Amino acid sequence: MSRILNLGVIGVGVVGRYHLQALMDQRNVKVIAVSDVSNEALKIASEKFKVKKCFKDYHDLLALENIDAVIVSTPPFNHAEITCDAATAGKHILCEKPMAMNSREAAKMVEACKKAGVKLGVCSARSRVIPQAQMAKKYISDGKLGDIYYARFTSIRRRGRPGIDILKESKWFLDSSKAGGGALMDIGCYDIDLALYLLEDPQPISVSATVYRGVGGKLRLKTKYDVEEHSSALVKFRGGVAVLFETAWAANMMPYQEALIFGSKGGLKIEPFTYFSEKDGKGVALSYDLGRIDWNTLQELLIKDFVEACLHDRPPKTTGEDGLKTMQIIDMAYKSAKLNREVRINEI
């Protein structure tokens, strides 16, 4: 492959245009073509980002021999089909989150890419590129936490339901047949991905979860709304580590995010980055101001990592195998909530 990655973007709605904007700032990328079922989306993308080749059928984009890789930024219900087709066409793939509708689809995507010898990255990697995650990874790798036995990841929005409070034109977020799930699927996947990264790729074995929809009372909607607004999932991993994921699109509570990791020698709070330990028999806490990264910068870092992975033949930050583990956890959580009991991985 040359030092320039020729790339196509499949799905150029709001999220796809975020990717296109980030691609404009990459020196070693050239956007060759875009695809979308919407003529309006194609027109906007073509004019704003100066892309000449536009296709309503993504198969026509995949047929272009000079395209090395694609970004799949459609709704989740066709991630699997497009990814498998792209792999068959010999293209590397960066797939938006959530990776798929369920773990069965995710497994097919991983297998298709493995068989074709192409790379598969997942956009839940956004959480891995922040400075706080990088420093936490180093602390854990250096053994400063000792034995990690528990972690808690919380992402709470006051009112942030896609299709209702934000991204109001994207009603598909509310329909399980198109989105796969609600808050856990949409934003919880970031926290699950970050936990997998920091805890050094643990193997999930079971989940006990609850879900809820109905915050603020009944809504008058003309569209289907059958996904959860709130989820709580306790995941047990091989080796005895347990992680609690609390995720909400809407809550009568202050909005906040928090990630805590508990170890026998020390603990971490990811933001603001704080290391808790003991010195001379007394508890100490060391905090570091690592700053915050805005959404546009996150996109640029995500794209840069995927491009370099393709050009230098290395794995992307979040691989398809990592994405599959995330989907397995989500599948177990939804089944647990439905059955009102703990669900093990061999049950999905």
Image (spheres, rainbow, N blue to C red):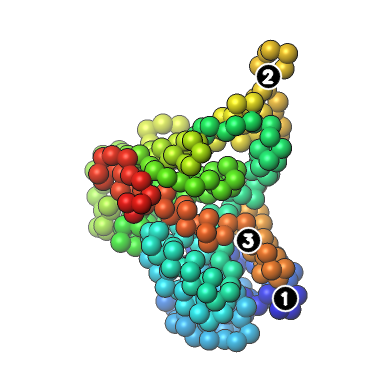
What residue is drawn where x is 44% and y is 63%?
A: 106
CA gap, disc 2 and disc 1: 50 Å
Mark 3 highlights which residue? 316
Mark 2 highlights which residue? 278
Viewer-side label of 2, 1:
2
**Residue 135 seen by the camera:** no
Residue 56 location, quadrant: bottom left
Q: Residues within 10 Å of mark 1 (few under 14, many from 20)?
A: some
Instruction: Say which label, 3 or 2, has the lower sequence index.
Output: 2
What residue is drawn where x is 56% and y is 79%?
A: 90
Q: Residues within 10 Å of mark 3 (few under 14, many from 20)?
A: many
Eyeballing the image, is 57 above or below 242?
below
In what element is the residue under mark 3?
A: loop
The quarter of the image holding the C terminus is: bottom left
Eyeballing the image, is 93 above or below 319?
below
Residue 317 location, quadrant: bottom right
Mark 1 highlights which residue? 4
Residue 218 position in % (x across, y down): 24, 43
Eyeballing the image, is 312 above or below 47?
above
Viewer-proximal residue among 344 and 179: 344
In what element is the residue under mark 2?
A: strand
Q: Amino acid at mark 2?
A: Glu
Instruction: Say which label, 3 or 1, has the lower sequence index.
Output: 1
Viewer-proximal residue among 150 and 65: 150
In what element is the residue under mark 1?
A: loop
Residue 193 position in % (x across, y down): 53, 49
